[in-house]
Image (spheres, rainbow, N blue to C red):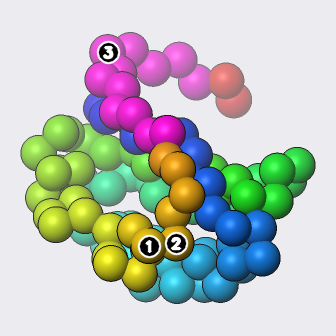
Amino acid sequence: MIIVAGQILVDPAERDRYLVGCVGVVEHARRTPGCLDFALSADLIDAARINVFERWETLEAVEAFRGSGPSDEQTAATLAAYVAEYDVVDVRSLT
C-alpha cells in the first residue's frame, strides 16, 4: 500500500476557491482503480494550509492517476508543497 500525505500552502484568501477547483480531481481519483482513499481538506488552524491524504493499493496505481500532475491553475496558486509517498508494509486497525 502507498500513502501520499502532506500539505499544500496557498494564499489564505484563495484557499476555498482552490479546494472547490479540486472537487473534480477528488471525484476522479476515488473512481480510479487502485485508489483506496483520496482527500484534500482545509486545515482547521492554518488558513493557508490544505491537507493532503491519499491511500493507494500500488505505486503503479498512483503513477497512473498522477499522469501529468496538477493543472497549471493549481500550480500557479500553490505557494509551497510538502508532500511525500510512504510505502506501507503492515497495517493495524485501531477500530
What kind of residue is marked 1?
A: Ala
User: Is disc 1 surrounded by few (<14), some (14 to 19) or many (20+) residues within 10 Å?
Assistant: few
What kind of residue is marked 2?
A: Ala
What kind of residue is marked 3?
A: Val
The residue at which mark 2 appears reads as 77
- For marks 2 and 3 on the same chain, the one whose residue lies earlier in the sequence: 2
Which one is in front, 69 or 62? 69
Side (left or right) of 56 relative to 48: left
The residue at which mark 1 appears reads as 76
Q: Work out how far the residue at label 1 is from the one at label 3, CA to CA, in angstroms.
A: 35 Å
Query: Where's residue 75, x and y in %?
Result: 40, 68
Q: Work out how far the residue at label 2 is from the one at label 3, CA to CA, in angstroms.
A: 35 Å
**Residue 56 is a magenta residue:** no
| Tags 1 and 3 touching, CB below 8 Å | no
Name which residue lies at 44% across and 73% down.
76
Picture disc at residue 89: 3
For the N terminus, the image quarter is top left
Query: Which is in the foreground here, disc 2 or disc 3?
Result: 2
Name which residue lies at 52% across and 50% down.
80
Element marked by disc 3: loop
Where are the magenta residues, as a range?
82-93
Examine the image and state in which quarter residue 16 appears: bottom right
- Is residue 22 placed above or below 43 in the rendered structure? below
- For marks 1 and 3 on the same chain, the one whose residue lies earlier in the sequence: 1
Name which residue lies at 59% across and 78% down.
18
| Tags 1 and 2 touching, CB below 8 Å | yes
- Is residue 1 placed above or below 35 in the rendered structure? above
